[in-house]
Amino acid sequence: MMEFTAAQIAEALQGKVEGDENVKVNNVAPIEQGKPGTLSFLSNPKYTEYIYGTEASIVIVNEDFKPEKPVKAALIKVPDAYQAFATLLTMYEQAKPVPEGIDSMSKIDETAKVGEKVFVDTYAVIGKNAKIGDRVQIHAQAYVGNNVTIGAGTVIYPGVKIYHDCVIGKQVTIHAGAVIGADGFGFAPKKGENYQKIPQIGNVVLEDHVEIGANTCIDRATMGSTIIREGVKLDNLIQVAHNVEIGHHTVMASQVGISGSTKIGKDCMFGGQVGLAGHINIGDNVKAGAQAGISGNIKDNQTVLGSPAISYIRERKAMAVYRNLPELWRKLNDLEQKINN
Amino acid sequence: MMEFTAAQIAEALQGKVEGDENVKVNNVAPIEQGKPGTLSFLSNPKYTEYIYGTEASIVIVNEDFKPEKPVKAALIKVPDAYQAFATLLTMYEQAKPVPEGIDSMSKIDETAKVGEKVFVDTYAVIGKNAKIGDRVQIHAQAYVGNNVTIGAGTVIYPGVKIYHDCVIGKQVTIHAGAVIGADGFGFAPKKGENYQKIPQIGNVVLEDHVEIGANTCIDRATMGSTIIREGVKLDNLIQVAHNVEIGHHTVMASQVGISGSTKIGKDCMFGGQVGLAGHINIGDNVKAGAQAGISGNIKDNQTVLGSPAISYIRERKAMAVYRNLPELWRKLNDLEQKINN
Amino acid sequence: MMEFTAAQIAEALQGKVEGDENVKVNNVAPIEQGKPGTLSFLSNPKYTEYIYGTEASIVIVNEDFKPEKPVKAALIKVPDAYQAFATLLTMYEQAKPVPEGIDSMSKIDETAKVGEKVFVDTYAVIGKNAKIGDRVQIHAQAYVGNNVTIGAGTVIYPGVKIYHDCVIGKQVTIHAGAVIGADGFGFAPKKGENYQKIPQIGNVVLEDHVEIGANTCIDRATMGSTIIREGVKLDNLIQVAHNVEIGHHTVMASQVGISGSTKIGKDCMFGGQVGLAGHINIGDNVKAGAQAGISGNIKDNQTVLGSPAISYIRERKAMAVYRNLPELWRKLNDLEQKINN
């Protein structure tokens, strides 16, 4: 990393320096691990205490931050410290060289169409009639099945497996080990015999700007498409079953599981390990707390918690009583005795 | 897809047409997305409303289906619409060419025995003394360890990893990223030191007609075998620990976790994210609702729910009261006051 | 396996034979599956009943074990039967040949430094400036990114993906499909637009003697390091988010999920499917029961259960009442009626 002064960084972020404008940094660090020469930021109020002791030379803060004690670091005040820091990191990332070129130890079917400035790394496989857009990166040991389409600027990390016929948008990121387009889990019971497999002849569509975490699985539709809309962000180890649809800009933490044919609206936020039943409808802007178990439809703008999930407020109240159930039980028995005597 | 008339499809399914026998379809679609020229089916009553508005040209229905409003589509009546549709899709799938041949960029150890009409795709690896049955498909970048046996007709999708000594039956399907035969999680505590690893010298046995979902993990036994019996179907991201046994035709939805040495009977059905403790016995035909936490033995034919799981009926009743705990608490306090005053 | 007498095994374990010193075994088996010629062990009291019927020729038992009925097998008495058995299995494992050598169909960047007696199997990839210690095993189709360091004696199983800049200690084991160093899940919301990705420029550090299960994901830090301390053992399908730290010798069963920036102490034990919120602190020697949902800080030496997790004792009591909520509800209503009439 190059060296920058507080003044230079403030200029790039259109922020205001408080403290030594000329102090220099050449690296970044979390605020609680800041060392001289590092740049940090403060956004989560939980970490406010660290700013008074941090050794970081510069800290980016929200413009409404007012220190209650002396701060050694130079401060750069901006409207949104988290976003400003993200912008800086992005500038840093974008300065890195972008990999390009086809490794001789990769296998691209001769019928595939490959755009310009594409990167295909060692032992990657691209199937028949696949269409790979410009500047796509297919990292080592990734697999792109027959007839798959991948839009411009998308990054497929090592070992990702994309089954045949899936459609991946532009500027999508798929992390290592994710599996896109494996068969949905469909079997028709047959008395006293093996289940009859329902062939899964649909596909998966990931729209633009989607990010898929490591080892996450998105199953192909029985018929039609499993659809992940623009800007959706899925963390690691998530299960998306066949014929699910996830609306624009919805984000889900890791280990969420969504059963078949469930439709989820836009701008939703799900905590880790949330589970959703099949064939239900979740509205827009729904929030679900970690480990919630959602078994029925949910309307727009609801926040739910618990398993089975109910409204957040109600669940919080029920939880509070739950902890005191032994006491409640005792009270009730006392009362009963009193009355019956 | 070729074009078929309603009469032709009815004949193949031994069903009865109601409506235009000559209407043609050349594709399939879910009923709520049906378009002219597509074939659909109605089985789940939740979707009945869609039949009155669907643009699908033909819909396969159960023979006892009686429309309450006019239906535009031609109907094909059969005893079981879901199974009939599955049969059609299977016929379609079976018409596809089956991949065959050994890619020059795969690595098959010279001591391995490979059957007839086998498919081994690019960058796949087959280890020493492995035995690969006829018509087995080993897709790209899959790994078959030393001494592994794979029965005829089995399909190993891209990137599957099968550790040494495992035994895979006939007509088994293993989806991308699944790991068969990694070490069970066994460590002996040693005070004030690193845990002592218990070597896992057993294997995994998958019997015939088993299907394993993407990124599911089945650990090898400490000694003996982790056994998945005939016809078991496991969804994605499931954890099966060492020395587990899963009985015939049991099915599990995604993200189920089974701890070590637990035995599960036949014909069980587990919802998503169910967890099972170790060293317990689950009977035949047991059903567990999503997110259940099973901590003890369960007898045949039980349906359980909740964490810790109890009988479904009891859990449903407890859940109903749980939601009203704040009210219950209030009531109790009111009563107490009344009595004490 | 070679053949050994009870006397020979007892000598190796410094144990004492009760029964026929000359009986021979040539294999091992779980006690409930013991056959003539096999060696087994009894440690978990749940399995005590099997010792009276087992056909195993020798059983290793704790020295305080007193049979209540005649036992056919020869017994070898040792202070800790589980550990003694582990020692035997380890001796057996260590007698196996260790793989060594570089497969011609692997790709090692010319700038990488590779130690002595290293094993690099088919289709494995080792990136630029990677440093691979002595006796490291990199199995088939594994991926070691640029600038990764791997300490001596570490085993990387097939298909593991290690992103750039990560640091892996000595004697570490990483099972198939695990992903080390994928991007942490960090996005800054932007109203009405796509989320802004926070580049994740940190890394992952696995210290010595760590074991990572199949398909487990450990994300790289936003800045700094996600750190897994010496001797930590993680089972399969676990999620470790960015900037998490897990203390020495902590063990976690499968499908645990840990949110970002959470710090976990040493010697903790977490059951399967436990979830932890982000930005919290868990003390040393904390135990969490399966499926616990930990939403806040926990002090040293606590045992917790439930979701949200509370003290084990309190949760057990609350659970007991929970099951009887319908009865409690009825009682309360009865009382109410009595009083109001």
Image: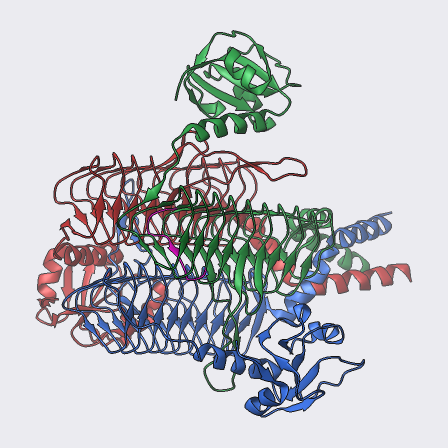
Chain colours: A red, B green, C blue
The residue under the point 51% across, 69% down is B185
State the count of labels.
0
Whole-percent x, y for residue C153 in the image: 33, 77
Quadrant of the frame with the N terminus of chain B: top left
Near-viewer residue (C338 or B184): B184
- Boundaries of the magenta span: B138-147
Quadrant of the frame with the C terminus of chain B: bottom right
Q: Is residue A285 left or right of residue C329?
A: left
Q: Is residue A145 left or right of residue C264?
A: left
From this view, report whether residue B17 is shown above or below residue B159: above
Whole-percent x, y for residue C38 in the image: 63, 75
Q: Specify whether residue A82 is in view.
A: yes
Q: Specify whether residue B341 is in view.
A: no
Q: Main secondary structure of the magenta part?
A: loop
From this view, report whether residue C10 is shown above or below residue C312: below
Near-viewer residue (C80 or B99): B99
Q: Quadrant of residue A57?
A: bottom left
Whole-percent x, y for residue A278 in the image: 53, 38
Whole-percent x, y for residue B53 in the image: 50, 16
- Give the residue at the far right of this rendering: A341
Q: Quadrant of residue B101?
A: top left
The residue under the point 68% across, 69% down is C32
Is residue C317 a member of the stretch shown in magenta? Answer: no
Q: Is residue C250 left or right of residue A249?
A: right
Q: Quadrant of residue C116?
A: bottom left
From this view, report whether residue C143 is shown above or below residue A203: below
The residue under the point 48% across, 87% down is B192
